[in-house]
Image (tube, rainbow, N blue to C red):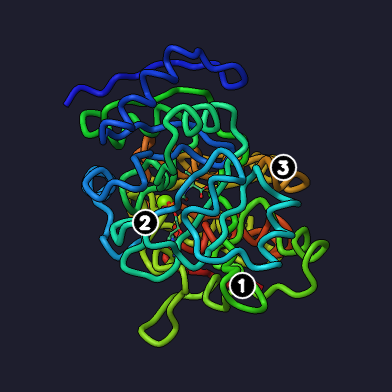
């Protein structure tokens, strides 16, 4: 299959290009498009065969359900059985935006979308290209992140092309995704609501709107058979570059990383360090890449997946990564880093 790639203005996308992409979706095809979090791989969310195509293109396990994307609040009602009060409050505060909510599903939502679950994940993205495309298609659009399963999610069209060229119909290139980490997922089908995946809409922000909000305790720990995350996708290896990634904890992480790097280099390994603007000049390694300033966790979120992919481009064998605080946006960053490292943490003093 030849993949059409078209550049679109991120604010004012060309109507003809959006119409072409919408038509592909209406005919059961696959279109990758930018959102404010990461690029999504879209298909008609009410068409089993089209959704199966998503799993095939990504190499995604079939028990990992998809998020349905809408372009207006009125499009929620037909795909869910109930809109709980807490969901209404969160919607009023954070939609459109980087928040996904889990609702009891309506009968029209196919099992391929929900992985056989009785619930469905719904998101109303705020990116003008995503909104225009969903609106023009006139359908709920199923869209996981547009990467090969297991790889870091794509924050630029070139990441999508690298993973999916030749496997999908079209890529809309709308530049770099602003948030860079996937949406926050909250299960509003239970009381109190539970965060299943941390993202740009933080626990602290949601607590301003609803009284109580819980966090799935498995978010920062290695899942096991009896300790399983509620979002099926969170149990899989994820965000992993080809290199072995280790997180390094403790105040003197710079010295510890330099010691480890020296040993690895002596053993003939190509060593990478995932650093910050504040520390990057202090490392002695083959490839030192900064994810931004520690003072600006939003910037770290935006850059994280691109930097993880860069370590592949540099062919590193092992990567040592700095850690971040667990509050605010830091929770989402640490959740993704822990997964990319397979939960391997080296503790220093
Ligand atoms: O920011 C995002 O959410 C991006 C953009 C494209 O919108 N999409 C995204 O989709 O990250 P994906 O498929 O990569 O991640 C969806 C996550 C998976 O971990 C999946 O298991 C979980 O949502 N999920 C989907 N439906 C669910 C359900 N009914 N119950 C619990 N978890 C669900
Ligand atoms: Mg994904």
Whole-percent x, y for residue 148 in the image: 31, 45
Whole-percent x, y for residue 230 in the image: 47, 73
Residue that appears at 49% across and 17% down: 8
> Given contact means CB atoms under 8 Å apart, are the residues at marks 1 and 2 in contact?
no
N-terminal label among 3 and 2:
2
Residue that appears at 66% across and 40% down: 292
Report which residue position mark 1 lands on: 194
Return the residue nearer the eye: 143 or 86.
86
Return the residue nearer the eye: 80 or 132.
80
Whole-percent x, y for residue 158 in the image: 40, 27
Report which residue position mark 2 lands on: 108
Q: Residues within 10 Å of mark 1 (few under 14, many from 20)?
A: many
Whole-percent x, y for residue 63 in the image: 30, 65
Q: Residue furthest left?
A: 1
Q: Spatial distance from mark 3 to mark 2, Cα to Cα?
A: 46 Å
Residue 282 visible to an observer of this rendering: no
N-terminal label among 1 and 3:
1
Q: Secondary structure at mark 1?
A: strand
Return the residue nearer the eye: 270 or 132.
132
Residue 5 visible to an observer of this rendering: yes
Q: Quadrant of the C terminus?
A: bottom right
Q: Quadrant of residue 282?
A: top right
Question: In this figure, what is the number of numbered marks?
Answer: 3
- For discs 1 and 3, the disc positioned in front in the rendered view: 1
> Given contact means CB atoms under 8 Å apart, are the residues at marks 3 and 2 in contact?
no
Q: Residue furthest bottom?
A: 226
**259 left or right of 277 in image:** left
**21 left or right of 293 in image:** left
- For discs 1 and 2, the disc positioned in front in the rendered view: 2
Label number found at residue 293: 3
Residue that appears at 50% across and 31% down: 135
Q: Secondary structure at mark 2?
A: loop
């Amino acid at each position: 299959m030849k993949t059409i790639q078209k550049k679109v203005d991120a604010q004012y996308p060309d109507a003809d290009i959006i119409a072409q992409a919408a038509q592909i979706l209406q005919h059961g095809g696959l279109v990758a498009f930018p959102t404010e979090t990461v690029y999504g791989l879209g298909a008609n969310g009410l068409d089993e065969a089209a959704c199966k195509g998503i799993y095939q293109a990504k190499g995604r396990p079939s028990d990992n359900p998809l998020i349905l994307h809408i372009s207006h609040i009125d499009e929620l009602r037909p795909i869910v059985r109930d809109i709980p009060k807490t969901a209404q409050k969160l919607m009023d505060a954070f939609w459109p935006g980087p928040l996904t909510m889990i609702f009891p599903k309506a009968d029209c939502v196919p099992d391929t979308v929900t992985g056989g679950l009785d619930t469905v994940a719904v998101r109303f993205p705020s990116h003008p290209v995503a909104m225009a495309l969903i609106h023009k298609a006139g359908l709920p659009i199923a869209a996981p992140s547009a990467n090969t399963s297991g790889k870091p999610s794509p924050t630029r069209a070139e990441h999508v092309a690298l993973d999916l060229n030749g496997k999908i119909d079209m890529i809309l290139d709308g530049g770099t995704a602003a948030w860079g980490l996937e949406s926050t997922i909250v299960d509003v089908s239970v009381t109190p609501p539970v965060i299943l995946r941390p993202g740009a809409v933080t626990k602290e922000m949601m607590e301003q709107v609803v009284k109580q909000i819980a966090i799935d305790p498995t978010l920062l720990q290695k899942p096991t058979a009896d300790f399983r995350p509620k979002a099926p996708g969170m149990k899989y290896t994820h965000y992993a570059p080809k290199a072995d990634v280790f997180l390094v904890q403790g105040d003197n992480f710079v010295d510890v990383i330099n010691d480890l790097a020296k040993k690895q280099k002596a053993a003939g390994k190509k060593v990478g360090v995932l650093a910050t603007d504040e520390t990057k000049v202090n490392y002695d390694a083959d490839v030192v890449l900064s994810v931004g300033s520690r003072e600006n966790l939003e910037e770290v979120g935006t850059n994280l997946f691109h930097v993880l992919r860069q370590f592949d481009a540099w062919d590193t064998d092992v990567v040592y990564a700095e850690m971040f605080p667990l509050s605010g946006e830091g929770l989402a960053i640490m959740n993704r880093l822990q997964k990319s490292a397979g939960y391997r943490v080296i503790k220093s003093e």
